[in-house]
Amino acid sequence: MAQRATTNLGGTASQIVVGKVAHGLMSMTWKPDPVPDEQCFEAIKAGIDALPSGAKMFHRTFLPENTLRSVNAVNEKLRGTKRLDLFQCARVDPNLPVELDHIGMSECSAETLRRGHKVHPISVVEIEISPFSYEPETRAVLNVLITAVAAYSPLGRGFLTGQIKKLEDLPADDNRRQFPRFQEDNLEHNLAIVDVLTEIAKRKNITTTQLCIGWVSSLGPHVIPLPGSSRADRTLENCSGGDVTFTETELQEIHQVIEKSGVKGARNPSVAVLWARGLIQASSKRVLCLYSNANRI
Ligand SMILES: NC(=O)c1ccc[n+]([C@@H]2O[C@H](COP(=O)([O-])OP(=O)(O)OC[C@H]3O[C@@H](n4cnc5c(N)ncnc54)[C@H](OP(=O)(O)O)[C@@H]3O)[C@@H](O)[C@H]2O)c1
C-alpha cells in the first residue's frame, strides 16, 4: 500500500505529525440508527493502520455536553454584561482526563481566530471546506496561516460523493433532509456540479470523493480534509484522496466549476427550520443558533 501523506498541526502542537486526511466520526452516531460498534472500530482502525509509523490520525468527535452546558448557563446569567474570565470545574469528573495539551477553535471567522490565537496558541481551526463551501470567509480563514485547518464536510455531507440523486435517497429521519442544499429547489442544480466534477475525476481515474478530498488538501500544506465515514473501505478511499496531485490546469478547471456553477442553498438550515423541527431546545438555543448561522462569527 502507498505511504500516506502527512502534515503537522499548528500552535503548541506543531511537533505533532498527522495524516494529511483526517477521519470524522460524526456519521457513526449522528443518525437515528447509529452504526454498530464493531463497524465503527473497523473503520477507525483501517484509517490508523494506513498511516506511516509515528503519524497520528486526527479524529474529531464531540465533547461531553456538561462542560458546554455549564459555560452556557454562566453566560446566560451574565447576559453579555461581562465576559467569563475563568472557567473552573467544581469537582473533577473521574471519567474525564484532565490532561489537555492543545486548543482548537471551530466555525469561527478569520478575525476571531486571530483574537483567539493571541489568548492562547490555536493548534487547529475547524471550518467547512468543499467544492460546495469555498466562500470568501472560508478563504479568509485559510489565509490566516497561523494554524492547521481541519476542513470538515469536504464531501458536502455526502452530496459530493454522487450517491444522493434525490431527497428520497436519504432515510426519512436523516438530518440532512433539513439542509438547504439537499432541498428539491436546489438539488438538481447542485447535482449538475457533482456531474462535472465526476467527469474530471473519471479523466484522472479517481473517484469524485478522492477528487474533492484531494482538491481540499491542495489548498495548502496546513489544510487537513476531515471527511466522515462509518465504513472501513470508504475511510481508506478517503485517506488516499490526500495523495492525489493536480496539474495547474486541472486546478484551474476545478476552480472554474466551483466559481461558475455556484452551489445553491445555505450551508446550514435556518434557525426557523431547526425550531420548527424541534432540533433546537430552549436550553441550547444560543449554541445551535451559532451553528445554524450561515456566516462565521
Ligand atoms: N465543526 C463543525 O461544526 C462540524 C460540522 C459538521 C461536521 N464536522 C466534522 O466533520 C466530519 C465530516 O463531516 P460530515 O460527516 O458532515 O460530511 P462529509 O465528510 O462531507 O460526508 C460524510 C457522508 O459521506 C458519506 N461518505 C464518506 N465517504 C464516502 C465515500 N468514499 N463514498 C461514498 N460515501 C461516502 C458518509 O457515509 P458513510 O458513513 O456511510 O460512509 C457520510 O454520509 C464529521 O464527522 C465531524 O467530525 C464538524
Image (cartoon, helix red, strand yellow):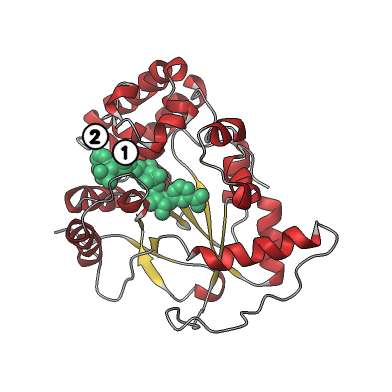
Residue 240 visible in image: yes
User: What's the residue at 52%, 68% (across, down)?
Assistant: 10
Q: Real-space Cα distance between discs 1 and 2?
A: 9 Å
- Badge 2 residue CB within 8 Å of ligand 1: no
Name, please, the residue furthest toward the left: 1
Q: Residue 245, position in %: x, y? A: 32, 45
Viewer-proximal residue among 34 and 111: 34
Q: Residue 257, position in %: x, y? A: 43, 24
The image quadrant of residue 57 is bottom left
Label 1, on which residue? 211
Secondary structure beneath dot 1 equals helix
Quadrant of picture, ligand 1: top left
Viewer-proximal residue among 290 and 143: 290
User: What's the residue at 17%, 61% (across, down)?
Assistant: 38
Q: Where 188 falls versus 95 (above or below)?
A: above
**For the residues bearing labels 1 and 2, Cβ distance under 8 angstroms:** yes
> Does 8 sit left or right of 211 as displayed?
right
> Does 57 sit left or right of 92 as displayed?
left
Name the quarter where the N terminus is drawn: bottom left
Residue 214 visible in image: no
Type of the residue with mark 1:
Leu
Q: Which mark is residue 204?
A: 2
